[in-house]
Amino acid sequence: MAGDTCDEDRRDAELHRRLAGSDPAAFEELYRRYAAPAYGLAFRVTGSEPLAQEVVHDSFLALWQAPRAFDPARGAFRSFFLSLVHHRAVDTVRREDRLRRRTERMNPTAGEDEDVAEEIVQESWLADRRVRVKAALERLSPEQREVLELAYFRGHTQARISEELGIPLGTVKTRTLAAMRRMRMLLSGADP
Amino acid sequence: MSLDHEAVQEMLAARALHALDDAERVEADAAIAAHLRGCDECREATEGLEAVAADLALVAPPRRPPRLLEGRLRREIRVRGPRRRSVPDRWVAGVVASVLVAAVAGLAIWNAHLTDRVTTAEQRSANTAELIATVSNPASRTVPLITAPAGGPRAQVSAAYIPGHRRLYLFGYLPEPSPGRVYEVWLARNGVYWDAGTFLPDERGLVFVRIVTDPRRFDTLLVTLEPAGGAPAPTGPAVVTAQL
């Protein structure tokens, strides 16, 4: 049964407070809560187990060493930490671009049936949110989904997306913003 | 540069997705920061777009990382212990009278690219967020620094602060100094200079410096090129400067 997101955010905030006091038990609990989504995200972006492990390792170590990089006043820990993991994954994949090209690419939707850790999601308090986000993505136009996929999950810059899709950079920008706005409306319930 | 809401929000969306390269991100951050200061609409959009990007992370199917990874991390945090985050206090030059030293006790500089060897994505992201939080405050002041010839054509640095807050930020681009040289920040009042620390831009020329002090106590900000280790008083050529 998924917990209430606000309760879980408060739980994260408490764990972060203890982490800032160098409490290893808080670190371990945050690892238990976020290792799977972090590793899943890193793997999705890098397409590589070793690179994903490097990203997750470095992200958690950075969290331990610099816990105050997260400011609770600026949002949820979940958003901060997964954004950190994503940023590291994107940096890694750009650095390892050649490796990425010869690694089998994950299709945005294919492969989820192969997810050996799906049960983690279903038991996780993040499950409900994940379902909502996926449903919102499905309601975007294919063109909007495509730019989000290329930017967020493949780590492409907008300039590279423009090249890859053969469309003007300005179109990539407007399409991306439109996609993000639509996602925001859908997730807030303003566009049922 | 003045941008409309749409252009700024396009940059905000790209930034939230990490879809800009480093140079584009710096340019975008500067433009966003300038715009957000006076735009409630785009400030509100910032939070919304970042929240959407954070939610996208959940779409990736979670995977259980190898157990070895958890064991490795557990060992490493035991060995390394907590990281010390205290900023290195930089005292003013030895020639400054003790009364002046007392006046600037607490004047400190923290430079991510010198003192924080684990600085990478998360710290840059935190720096950017901190900077945007500062410049988007309606009470904040952003001061473009005037580039002197020693700064070269690429130098572009601004200072930002919120009156009443003990933080002064320098951010922008500076070229890599020649070997054995560093940049040194000076704050001055009535012609008396305080050393606020040395720094180097990162490998891409990016500068982010946080100085812990109340900038209203000073009338001038100056960056000079000095020998590695810094100088007790400004001796090298001025690179950028501003009246505070």
Image (cartoon, rainbow, N blue to C red):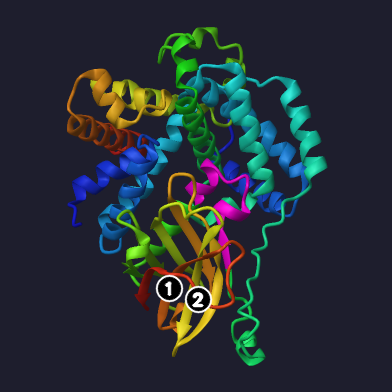
In the rendered image, is residue B98 in sight? yes
Instruction: Tell me the number on the disc at residue B234.
Output: 2
Spatial CA span between label 1 and label 2:
9 Å
Image height check: is B22 above or below A158? below
Q: How many marks?
A: 2
Q: Earlier in the sequence, mark 1 or mark 2?
A: 1
Camera-nearest label, 1 or 2: 2
Which residue is at a point 39% across and 41% down the rendered structure image?
A: B22
Circle 2: element type: loop
Q: Badge 2: few (under 14), some or many (20 or more) residues near its Cα, within 10 Å?
A: some
Relative side of B229 to B243, left or right: right
Which residue is at a point 46% across and 24% down the rendered structure image?
A: B59
In the rendered image, is residue A141 in sight? no
Which quarter of the figure has residue B134?
bottom left
Q: Badge 1: few (under 14), some or many (20 or more) residues near its Cα, within 10 Å?
A: many
Please report the bounds of the magenta region as a residue range.
B109-126
| Disc 1 target residue | B222
Q: Position of residue B235 (x, y in %)?
A: 50, 74
The three-letter amino acid code for the residue at tag 2 is Pro
Q: Position of residue B25 (x, y in %)?
A: 36, 44
The three-letter amino acid code for the residue at tag 1 is Leu
Which residue is at a point 78% across and 44% down the rendered structure image?
A: B80
Question: Nearest the camera: B86 or A117?
Answer: B86
Instruction: Locate the C terminus of chain A and report the quarter of the image it occupies.
Output: top left
Q: Are marks 1 and 2 in contact (CB under 8 Å)?
A: yes
Q: Chain of mark 1?
A: B
